[in-house]
Amino acid sequence: MAITSGADLSIIEGRLTAARAGYIDNLSAGAVAQAGVFTATRAGYLDNLSAGAAALQATAAAIPTTSINRIQSCTIQVVVGQSTGNTTITAVVLAKTIFVRGGNVAVWGAPRNADDDFNVSFTSSTNVQAVTGSAVANALIKVQGWVVEYK
């Protein structure tokens, strides 16, 4: 509302109570009081918010969208009379690779627990080997799984 006459000023003065005048005084006093609290250290915190956000954005952009580089499925056969079986895979970085045993391990002509009696390992960056506790007698064991290489 624009003050255009003495009557308008009288309306404003009539509404301006002592409490309301105190609020107006505190607006100025509050700003002065807050100015003393805003130190160089606190100003530095505000500056770091901007620099920190930029650094965080750059870091987030460098994070791969997936942590897996490649997954290969494979089947390793241990045949009658052997205690090891090998299969060739595409070259991997061994320090970043694991073998995940699949749900399908086939055992033909062997006791039911024979499928638990083996270890799987990498003998090179291109070979996965299954080793049984002893030579397979009258059986064929197929170990299925995945070679998972991380980034």
Image (cartoon, helix red, strand yellow):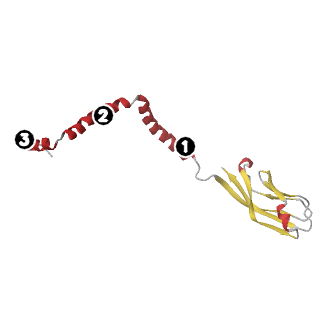
Which labelled disc corresponds to residue 31?
Answer: 2
Q: CA distance from mark 3 to mark 1?
A: 64 Å
The residue under label 3 is which amino acid type? Answer: Gly
Counting residues from the N terminus, which is met first, the one under dot 1 or under dot 2?
2
**Is residue 7 visible in the rendered structure shown here?**
yes
- Dot label at residue 119: none
Please state the horizontal and vertical placement of residue 19, each as a whole percent of the image. Answer: 22, 40
Judging by the rendered image, the residue that carries numbered circle 1 is: 59
What residue type is disc 2 on? Answer: Ala
The picture quadrant where one finds residue 59 is top right
Q: Is residue 129 visible?
A: no
Camera-near label (1 vs 2) is: 2
Distance between the alpha carbons at the discs numbered 3 and 2: 31 Å
- Residue 116: percent from left, percent from top: 82, 62
Residue at the front extreme, as displayed: 18
Nearer-the-camera pick, 72 or 134: 134
